[in-house]
Image (cartoon, rainbow, N blue to C red):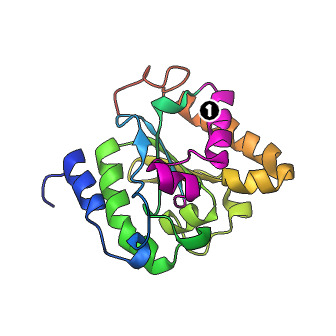
Amino acid sequence: MAEISWELFERQVESCAMCPLHNGIHHKVPGQGDRTAPLMLIGEGPGEREDLEGLAFVGAAGQLLTRMLAAIGLPRDRVYICNIVKCRPPFNRNPEPEEMAACMLHLRMQVALVRPRVIVLLGGTAAKATLDPNLHITRARGQWTERKGIWMMPTYHPSFLLRDESRKREAWEDMQSLKRKLTELGLYPDLYGGETP
Ligand code: URA
């Protein structure tokens, strides 16, 4: 593989036309946050606000996500946040498998650049795209899998939690499990207290 860099990543995303999703969007939404963070969060795809601002998780779901992180002592600016697809699917429909497959090139480069120790997959779409296309989020949530030295855990998507408050207890358990995993890895309470990732 040619040498990768953030500059290459940004150029690659900006010029990407590998699937039809780039048609009619306002902004690509590559992701943002601490590019050296040991914790990466991956959602599904940009919504309306994200498309307008070019930033991931800035709408209502993003505000809930910020509160969920804060509840376990993680300031949002110390994690890296992105999505499976970098362009907003029309009318917030789920991204198609071919669209996710096309965008995976960008996500792989992002993971290689950030080199997180832990990845939290927000929602069934992100978990299926990265772990197992047959997975059921209600069964898979809270379960840890190690892939190439990275610990990965699916949890509910914050948009789902906004629609179904009864799932918040399970999401809270998942956040506690995340805290335990970060502690085990020497990354908590100070995310940067352990070894440099
Ligand atoms: N939902 C997502 O999956 N990602 C965002 O960036 C916003 C809402």
Circle 1 is placed at which residue position? Answer: 179
Residue 193 placed where, x, y %?
Answer: 44, 19
Which residue is at a point 47% across and 48% down the rendered structure image?
53
Residue 34 placed where, x, y %?
Answer: 40, 34
Label 1 residue SS: helix
Which residue is at a point 42% across and 54% down the rendered structure image?
29
Region of the chain picked out in magenta, as a range: 44-73
Q: Please tell me in which quadrant of the rendered image residue 169 appears.
A: top right
Identify the image quadrant of the N terminus: bottom left
Q: Please tell me in which quadrant of the rendered image residue 127 appears.
A: bottom right
Residue 111 placed where, x, y %?
Answer: 36, 50
Q: Is residue 118 visible to us here?
A: yes
Disc 1 residue lies near ligand 1 with CB under 8 A: no
> From what the image shows, is residue 86 above or below residue 31?
below
Identify the image quadrant of the C terminus: top left
Magenta segment includes 21: no
Q: Left or right? Give the position of 174 relative to 146.
A: right
Q: Left or right? Give the position of 189 relative to 111.
A: right
Which residue is at a point 29% across and 46% down the rendered structure image?
113
Task: Determine the quadrant in which ligand 1 lies.
Answer: bottom right
Residue closest to the eye, 29 or 192: 29
Q: Left or right? Give the position of 64 relative to 128.
A: right
Which residue is at a point 30% across and 60% down the rendered structure image?
13
Residue closest to the eye, 28 or 38: 28
| SS assignment for the magenta stretch, majority | helix
Q: Residue furthest right?
A: 166
Residue 3 placed where, x, y %?
Answer: 13, 52
User: Which amino acid type is marked by label 1?
Assistant: Lys
Magenta segment includes 66: yes
